[in-house]
Image: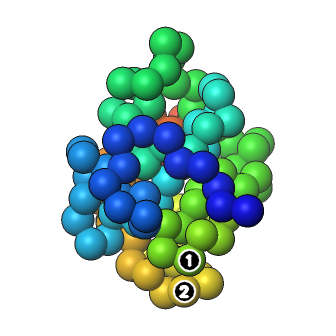
Amino acid sequence: MMTKVFGSTVDNETRCIHYHQPEDVIAIKFNCCSKYYPCYKCHQENEAHSIIPWPKDDWDKQAILCGSCKMELTINDYMAAVQCPHCAAPFNPRCSNHYHLYFDMRGEGL
């Protein structure tokens, strides 16, 4: 069964109208609604609630979807990778600029 990705996707690899470079191939399961979205902008456009970042204690949960191979990764695995550990699709390194929106980064020094 295919994991549903919500938002304004532009292809079947989770790219969206906001982020659609070749390396933009992940979707995030948002802690607040348990729905996968390609980015925070897609979430904001489709949900009536605020984003609740994943607490550090939950970073061992699968909450990242590789749009290339459809494998789910834990937050820890995703944050430690520059590419998908399953299919080697490169991840956009600039996504780390938005980690604070998705993950509780207090004490992480990022």
The mark tally for this picture is 2
- Residue 53 % position (x, y): 57, 32
Taking the spot 67% from the left edge, 36% from the top edge, the residue there is 34
Vertical arrangement, residue 25 with respect to residue 109, above or below? below
Residue 75 visible at all: no
Residue visible at 73% across and 62% down?
1
Q: Which residue is drawn at the image coordinates 43% and 48% (left, top)?
A: 38
The label nearer to you, 1 versus 2, is: 1
Q: Is residue 41 left or right of residue 20?
A: right
Report x, y in % for residue 84: 53, 78
Q: N-terminal of the two: label 1 or label 2?
A: 1
In this image, 22 relative to 14: left or right?
Answer: left
The residue sitting at 61% across, 38% down in the picture is: 35
Q: Residue furthest front?
A: 1
Pointers 1 and 2 in contact (CB under 8 A)?
A: yes
Identity of the amino acid at label 1?
Cys
Q: Residue furthest top?
A: 48
Q: Nearer the viewer, residue 87 or 99?
A: 87
What amino acid is labelled 2 in the image?
Cys
- Secondary structure of residue under mark 1: loop
Instruction: Give x and y (percent) for residue 89.
Output: 44, 81
Visible in this render: residue 86? Answer: yes
Using a 10 Å C-alpha cutoff, classify the residue at mark 1 as few (fewer than 14 neighbours), some (14 to 19) or many (20 or more). some
Q: CA distance from mark 1 to mark 2?
A: 6 Å
**In this figure, which residue is indicated by the disc labeled 2?**
87
Q: Is label 2 in a helix, a strand or a loop?
A: loop
Q: Which residue lies under the disc numbered 1?
A: 69
Residue 101 image-quadrant placement: top left
Q: Indicate whether 43 appears above or below 96.
A: above
**Residue 71 occupies quadrant:** bottom right
Q: Which of the two residues, 68 or 106, is positioned nearer the viewer here?
A: 68
The residue closer to the viewer here, 16 or 72, is 16
